[in-house]
Amino acid sequence: MSAHEIETDVVIVGAGPVGLFAVFELGLLDLKCHLLDILDRPGGQCAELYPEKPIYDIPGFPVITGQELTDNLLKQVAPFGPEFHYNRMVVSLEKQEDGRFRLVDDEGQAYVCSVVVVAAGGGSFQPKRPPVPDIADYEGTSVFYAVRRMEDFRDQDVMIVGGGDSALDWVLNLAPLVRSLTLVHRRDNFRAAPVSVGRMKELVAQGKMRFVLGQMKELHGADGQLTSVSVRTAGGEENIPVTRLLPFFGLTMKLGPVADWGLELNDNLIAVDTEKFESSVPGVFAIGDINHYPGKLKLILSGFHEAALMAQAAKKIISPDERLVFQYTTSSTRLQRKLGVKK
């Protein structure tokens, strides 16, 4: 095996609530997990699209926000030490001669595992491209839809466009590094956390950045490198020096490369059984909104149930000779020690 490959028991594609709970169920069975997600944080749709929106159908919680649910799940899986790989998309999956799977992400990182769990919600989140002429010419060189390395923005003239949590978070994170920073949003109110908005306004008041009320109109530059961006404002049009542009115009969901993995699909969803939630390829499971079976309900609680049954089947694949004894966390001293609640 290459020194650059990561070897683990299970690779989970998707770090939303269902993927996170899968870590818990697999961890109880002593299975090590690596998770990959195209977003820059855990929580999937819950954390990215409605972090402050109340959810009312999580058992035991009359009301909980998407971010609170994510935070609780992260605390729950902490004892099992899962390893996360953000801003990553799995581009290929192959079965090896030894029966294990080899996955490669869009950064070229390879993972070798015995079980693959697809918990990618409705598919991978893809950034929406702003309706600005020729923006594709600059993508990957000076236009980015995610921050993979903050150092790439040091001493640059950065423009961030958007009014949600991602836009405001990166305003605050990049402000100490950049040469100049401009936030552009079409409205004077934001969808981000109030504390983030308040900190942004403090930076504006201190002269450490600009906020421009307006909309991008045109990009200027050559050979993929931006030099400035024209912004339409109430007072006319302003040309702002920019060498790095981060547009946060929301996300759209696509099945993505999963469609090329040779799995049986049903209307762009992965067909699974209802005993193990295994796909048509043995060892590859699908849980949560990404799967399809008769009577499927797209609910987080359904995904939690699917994760529990999947974990039992995964253990049998990884440890076929080990006798699997079902245990309850309420009564098993062994499980309670794993969770750190009993010495």
Image (cartoon, rainbow, N blue to C red):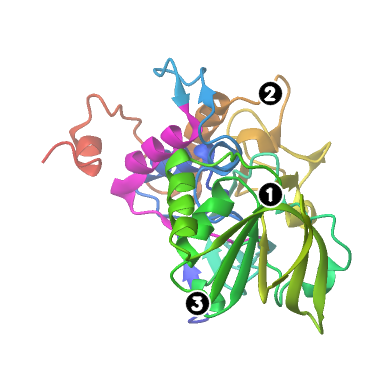
- What residue did someone put label 2 on? 296
Quarter residue 140 falls in: bottom right
- What residue did someone put label 3 on? 151
- Kindly state the secondary structure of the residue where label 2 is placed: loop
- Kindly state the secondary structure of the residue where label 1 is placed: strand
Residue drawn 78% across the image and 52% down it? 259
Q: Earlier in the sequence, mark 1 or mark 2?
A: 1
111 relative to 200, above or below: below
Residue drawn 46% across the image and 37% down it? 67
From the viewer's perspective, tell me whether residue 91 is left or right of residue 339: right
The magenta stretch is: 65-89
Number of dots carrying numbers: 3
Inter-mark Cα distance, 1 to 2: 22 Å
Where residue 230 appears, as percent x and y from the top left, is: 79, 65
Where residue 203 appears, as percent x and y from the top left, is: 45, 58
- What residue did someone put label 1 on? 125
Quarter residue 38 falls in: bottom right
